[in-house]
Amino acid sequence: MHAVSDLSTAAYCPRQLYYRRDDDCEIPPSVADRRELAFEYDDLLDADDAMLAERPIELPPEQYRATLDRTRERIERWDELADPPHREVLLTGRECRGIASKVLESPLAPSYVSPGAPPERGVWEPHSVRAVALAKALSWEREELVETAFVEYPAYGTVRELSLTTRRKAGYRAAIGAVERMDGPPSRLTNSAKCDACEYRERCGTRTRSLRSLLGL
């Protein structure tokens, strides 16, 4: 039984997971505050600039409201996401277990709320793996097919709906394999931008090259 968070971390960097397993990680208050935005969508749409300025959003108030409003128009299941029937649900599947930020009914779909920024399109690979893992765990618990999942980036007013495609399932299986094969520190990444913001960079010893060196200057 694997933790869904481990699979997500393994999809980002298996070596990061190796170090993180030794730490007692607590969720920072700032992360919890950002995730709470995902349960305040209707209030945020009606909030004025002063109220939004006090919330942990990452866009100017006017742009945030406009982005959130476009999201509401685009996502068919907006009402359920704004007022979910189930929140913070522990799901246990055949291979993994973890907490879904929200669970929607008819049709079943889990949602993961990220405190970070979305890519221009789709979702980041670790979030894709997490979404598939939650969908599979939900499907196993309810004995019902789950074909979609959501990833929310509430600090940016963005929600992405995912279909459980063959490619996404393959990413999930790759993460399962990375976790199950781990019996020591995995290989370091090479010249990866992921290393720049990693809290284990010094312990890992990964060297990154500057833009100047990459250009041969």
Image: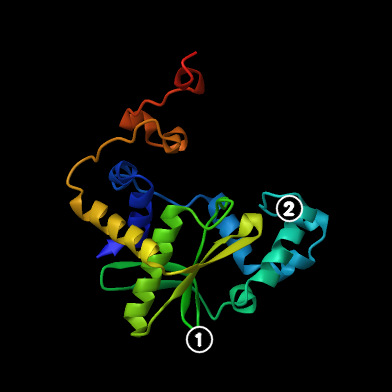
Q: Secondary structure at mark 2?
A: loop
SS under mark 1 = loop
- Left or right placement of residue 8 versus residue 61 in this view: left
Q: What amino acid is found at the position of numbered circle 1 in the picture?
A: Ser
Image vertical order of residue 209 relative to residue 112, above or below: above
Residue at 47% over, 36% down: 197
The answer for how far apart the CA atoms under marks 1 and 2 are is: 36 Å
Mark 2 packing: few (<14 Cα in 10 Å), some, or many (20+)?
few
Residue 23 quadrant: top left
Name, please, the residue furthest toward the left: 183
Residue at left offset 67%, top offset 52%: 57
* Above-or-below relation of 174 to 16: below
Q: Nearer the viewer, residue 214 or 173?
A: 214
- In this rendering, the count of numbered labels is 2
Q: Which residue is mark 2?
A: 54
Mark drawn on residue 38: none
Q: Position of residue 64 (x, y in %)?
A: 73, 56
Residue extending farthest to the top is 217
Percent across and percent down for residue 159 are 59, 64
Foreground: 53 or 125? 125
Percent from the top left, x then y, of residue 34? 59, 56
Q: Residue at x 67, y 66 (%)?
A: 71
Along the viewing direction, whichever of 87 and 76 lies nearer the viewer = 76
Instruction: Pick the quarter of the image with the N terminus.
Output: bottom left
The residue at which mark 1 appears reads as: 106
Q: Residue 156, how many percent across, how many down?
A: 65, 55
**Residue type highlighted by circle 2:** Glu
Colour approach in the figure: rainbow
Q: Crowding near pointer 1: few (<14 within 10 Å), some, many (20+)?
A: few
Tell which circle, 1 or 2, labels the residue nearer the N-terminal end.
2
Q: Check contact, mark 1 vs mark 2: CB within 8 A.
A: no
